[in-house]
Amino acid sequence: MVMELLVTTSLFLPWPFSGISCIIQGCIHHRGQSGFHIKLNMKSLITADFSAAAVLITFGALLGKVSRLQLLIIAFIEILMFAVNEFILLEELKVADAGGSMVIHCFGAYFGLALSFVLKRPEDTDNNAKEGSVYHSDIFAMIGTIFLWMYWPSFNSVLVSPAVDQQRAVINTYLSLVACCVTTFAVSAFINTDRKLDMVHVQNATLAGGVAVGTLANMIIEPWGAILIGFLAAILSVAGYKYITPFLDEKLHIHDTCGVNNLHGMPAILAGIAGAVAAKLADADDYKDSLGSVFPSDYSSSKRAGYQALALLITLGISIVSGAITGFIVKQSVFDPPTSEQLYDDADFWKLPEIVDNHNQPNAEIPLHRGPTTTRTEAPSS
């Protein structure tokens, strides 16, 4: 019931807010200067698109629970806070985050989860019958998974230095994705008592390796290191969909519609931790001339590792606090929050086809409600 909203937010919102992001980031990067011009180049445009990706990740946690006006306000505030966090990490601390695991995935996921926690109302029904999927939408979502899987190496390598660093980022990402994909199928079958594969796991957890290796994509981690990261990311993501998402919903009242914590949040934390370890172990003899393109040349190994860990903590802090504050803002009645009856329903916003009578239409599709651990499917975002 929320497919129209998902598709249109993915198509419409990134474009205007990418432009806004260019302006905000330009102002932050040129703060204190007089008569400056905001320069547009390939890097600034890509970074602006990355900020829109963080917003779409946030929407994954909120899908079906917010109005169009709320989405617009959330996107504007998040773009601003994204730029602040990115400036602190990449310009002040100068940490390595080639694929944006901390800047994009971690920030977007926990900004959204904090919002979801604040927006949760006592009268909202858990396990809403409309919060489900049908067979054809699951198959449709797999198209997104396949495209993301194919292009994730270019996503992780687009902003790193060309030649050696870029080649290293592509190889590390590819190996991590392969290991993650194979492990996801194995763990999905193992974790289910009937030994069947779960489409939610296949749609999402197969991509977690790309997130988990993003921070250290252009670092020398050896092939076995990239494979190990993909292996761990798959286990973490599948276990998250099976156990952690229901726990967050039932015990902590943090509802995660698309499971962004499992695909983006926890793998990004894994990336941040692994990045700190890899930064500590970085050896100039191994990197040769490319060490300075990954880390600042005047940083010691301890300083590199410390700043990488600090960057993860700063991202978590800014995203959670700003997400919670944004939640308190947009839950006010002036921003038209949906009623409990409007949750996960597009009927108030879209012209929908007439509902067919499933008893008279033998070929009509019936929603596949698969219980609280598997109804939160995601058309995977960035």
Image: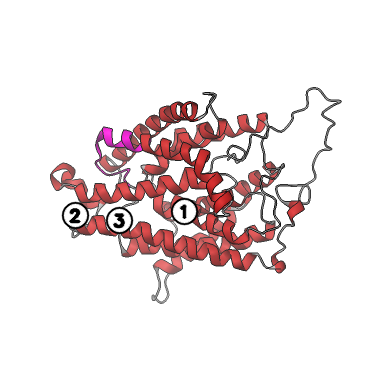
Residue at 52% over, 38% down? 242
Name the residue at the left extreme: 285
Give the prevailing secondary structure in the magenta stretch: helix
The reply to whether residue 37 is in sight is no
Mark 1 in CB contact with mark 2 (< 8 angstroms) = no
Residue extent of the magenta highlight: 216-230
The reply to whether residue 197 is in sight is yes
The 10 Å Cα crowd at callout 1, few under 14, some 14 to 19, many 20 or more, is some
Q: Which residue is mark 3?
A: 308
Q: Secondary structure at mark 3?
A: helix
Q: Which residue is mark 2?
A: 301
Q: Amino acid at mark 3?
A: Gln
Mark 3 in CB contact with mark 2 (< 8 angstroms) = no
Q: Amino acid at mark 1?
A: Leu
Q: Secondary structure at mark 1?
A: helix
Residue at 41% over, 59% down? 315
Distance from the alpha carbon under mark 3 to that under mark 2:
11 Å
Residue 69's tag is none
Q: Earlier in the sequence, mark 1 or mark 2?
A: 1
Residue 45's tag is 1
Distance from the alpha carbon under mark 1 to that under mark 3:
25 Å
The 10 Å Cα crowd at callout 2, few under 14, some 14 to 19, many 20 or more, is some
